Amino acid sequence: MTMSTSHFKPLFFVMLFLLPLTSHCADSDPLQDFCVADYSAKTSGDGFACKPASEVKADDFFFSGLRYEGNTTNKFGTLTTHGDVLSFPALNTLGLSMNRVDFAPGGLNPPHIHPRSSEIVFVVEGTLLAGFLTSKHVLFSKVVNAGDMFVIPRSLVHFQLNIGKTKARTITSFNSQFPGDPIMSTNLFGSTPTIPNEVLTKTFQVDDNIVNLIKSKFSP
Ligand SMILES: *[C@@H]1O[C@H](CO)[C@@H](O)[C@H](O)[C@H]1NC(C)=O
């Protein structure tokens, strides 16, 4: 005896609506096997133009940029090495990328967002406090150790702080070829042109001196 198909219809329609949603959560799908970025092309769509297929070599699909430890001698004590489409042209149209982040002891990957991507943080070395904020101002944070992963939903403000005594290192992966990573402090206080003080004094409920002081630390 067969079951009534009426039970399955709602599920079928739910799936029908979910399918296009899942395929539009990140970068658009590729239209060809590959489209190695041609940075010098004068025109492109949303991304880079393709290098002629006849000129594509195995080396185009290889990138060793994440081998090297980043120099963490800077004000945050961290350095992000990008393995995105700007450094690894074969990622063009593939909808993924990876970065390496090195942390000095006490180093902070300061609050920032990835406007086009969710992120998985894989801890290779060290101990970090990783957290993100929801759009309702709730903080979700965890202490993560070597071998652990932490996931950050797309576009939410997040940070990682090295709370261990040694240096730390993460490999982060993204469902975008070019996630973008504006740091909130630089975005607001180090923009070009600069945001008028009136906006910032009101936003942060402080006076001009404080805004000028913070601006001086993030001037472009
Ligand atoms: C790291 O960066 C600092 C500050 O820019 C610089 O003084 C230092 O020489 C760099 N270290 C290496 C190993 O490149």
Image: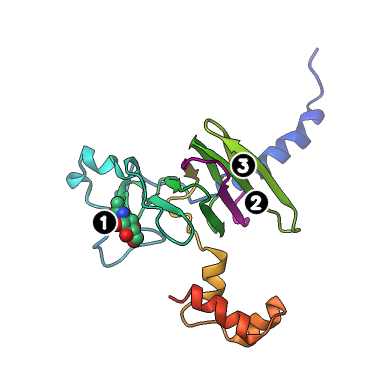
The C terminus lies in quadrant: bottom left
Q: Is mark 1 within 8 Å of ligand 1?
A: no
State the extent of the magenta-drawn residues as a range. 152-171
Q: Camera-side residue: 89 or 212?
A: 212
In this rendering, the answer to whether 195 lies above or below 55 is below
Do the numbered discs 3 and 1 sit on residues whose CB atoms are within 8 Å? Answer: no
Q: Residue 198, position in %: x, y?
A: 64, 87
Report whether 76 appears left or right of 53: right
Residue 38's label in the rendered image is 1
What residue is disc 3 on? Answer: 19
Report whether 58 appears left or right of 123: left
What residue is disc 2 on? Answer: 132
The N terminus lies in quadrant: top right
Q: Residue at x 69, y 76 (%)?
A: 204
Q: Inspect the image, locate mark 1, and give the three-letter code of the amino acid beneath it.
A: Asp
Q: Residue 68, position in %: x, y?
A: 32, 43
Q: Camera-side residue: 28 or 98?
A: 98
In this rendering, the answer to whether 23 lies above or below 158 is above
Disc 3 is placed on an element classified as helix
Do the numbered discs 3 and 2 sit on residues whose CB atoms are within 8 Å? Answer: no
Q: Camera-side residue: 133 or 163?
A: 163
Q: Inspect the image, locate mark 2, and give the three-letter code of the amino acid beneath it.
A: Phe
